[in-house]
Image (tube, grey):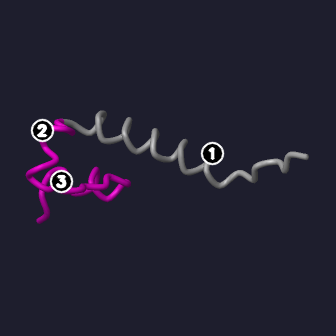
Amino acid sequence: MRGKYYDRMQQGTNIILLAPDLVETFPDSESVNEALRGLKKIAVRSTKPVPATR
């Protein structure tokens, strides 16, 4: 018998462990997600080609 939450965990839950020094900065999953979304926006913007100026 597996734990009572086994099926729920198999449906796409990702568990990520933070290093102890990051726990104060990112106390919950929402703060981690917000930071990652910001980094994603920066990465997308930095990969767009810049038009040449004349």
The residue shown at (27%, 54%) is 9
Q: Position of residue 42 (x, y in %)?
A: 53, 44
Q: Secondary structure at mark 3?
A: loop
Q: Nearer the viewer, residue 2 or 52?
A: 52
Q: Earlier in the sequence, mark 2 or mark 1?
A: 2
Q: Nearer the viewer, residue 3 or 45?
A: 45
Q: Which portion, as a residue range, is magenta?
A: 1-27
The quadrant the N terminus occupies is: bottom left
Q: Residues within 10 Å of mark 3 (few under 14, many from 20)?
A: few
Q: Any mark on residue 25, and which?
A: none
Q: Earlier in the sequence, mark 3 or mark 1?
A: 3
Q: Secondary structure at mark 1?
A: helix
Mark 2: amino acid: Glu
Q: Position of residue 27 (x, y in %)?
A: 16, 36
Q: Is residue 40 left or right of residue 4?
A: right
The residue shown at (84%, 50%) is 52
Mark 3 vs mark 1, CA separation in Å: 27 Å
Q: Tell me if residue 9 is in the magenta stretch.
A: yes
Residue under label 3, please give it: 18
Residue under label 1, please give it: 45
Give the vertical position of 1 relative to 20 (above or below). Answer: below
Residue under label 2, please give it: 24
Q: Position of residue 25 (x, y in %)?
A: 19, 38
Q: Verify CB contact (< 8 Å) between mark 2 and mark 1.
A: no
Mark 1: amino acid: Arg
Q: Earlier in the sequence, mark 3 or mark 2?
A: 3
